Image (cartoon, rainbow, N blue to C red):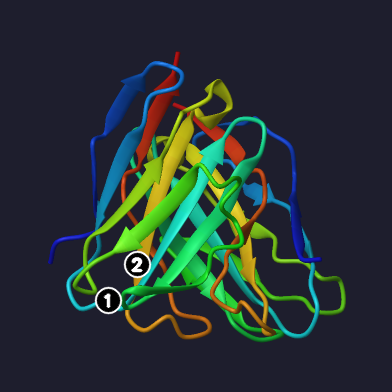
Amino acid sequence: GNSVTQMEGPVTLSEEAFLTINCTYTATGYPSLFWYVQYPGEGLQLLLKATKADDKGSNKGFEATYRKETTSFHLEKGSVQVSDSAVYFCALIHSGGSNYKLTFGKGTLLTVNP
Amino acid sequence: GAGVSQSPSNKVTEKGKDVELRCDPISGHTALYWYRQSLGQGLEFLIYFQGNSAPDKSGLPSDRFSAERTGGSVSTLTIQRTQQEDSAVYLCASSPKGLYRETQYFGPGTRLLVL
């Protein structure tokens, strides 16, 4: 079946540090890949997505590249801010049947200290 | 414009009672989804609606769970005879047409606690 594995948290960084959150996936066909973010007390928001191999999604200084050869979609940001503190979820939708169902990783809690 | 709204935001109930959770999707979105977020299981898909019909109910964990959607808009998730393991955050999402690769827009969730 389809699955997403992301690095265990929590991750604690100082402001302006470099961020990487690893995400790998198992899926048949050619899934679309997503990063969602959940800020404290808020709902899930799409951060970025990529729909085919070698695509790079980017938003708010965050980037992730769809790597089919390594089945990965790692999230990076060059300089984090306190306001980036949130839970980050990697997710996929696969290209076969049920191609509307998001499969999520377990989430990574990021805390950024001033 | 308005996003996905859910009510109530919090619900505390006693074991064995029935609860109804409501979702109001983004206007014009034909696809609607329910997910559940719990500590043990993470985020899980429950059910998908296209218009008023539910072609995929595969994620509903038991026959105590049911959902309906009326007028192609508001959806209600009903849990009968609640159990403590039903305690979770129930998330609703919608998307324009339910097409592959569409972004799903999530509501703030309903936090359910079963005592």
Crowding around mark 1 (Cα neighbors within 10 Å: few <14, some 14 to 19, many 20+) is some
Secondary structure, mark 2, is strand
Label 2 close to label 1 by CB (< 8 Å) = yes
Residue type at tag 2: Ser
Place of residue A59 in the rendered image (x, y in percent of width and height, measured from the top left)? 44, 66
Q: Which mark is residue B94?
A: 2
Residue at image coords 56%, 34%: B38
Q: Which mark is residue A109?
A: none
Q: Is residue A17 above or below residue A92?
A: above
Q: Position of residue B88 (x, y in %)?
A: 49, 32
* Residue identifier under label 1: B29
Residue that appears at 54% across and 75% down: A100
Q: CA distance from mark 2 to mark 1?
A: 6 Å
Element class at badge 1: loop
> Visible in this render: residue B30?
yes
Residue B115 spot, x, y in % from top left: 45, 13
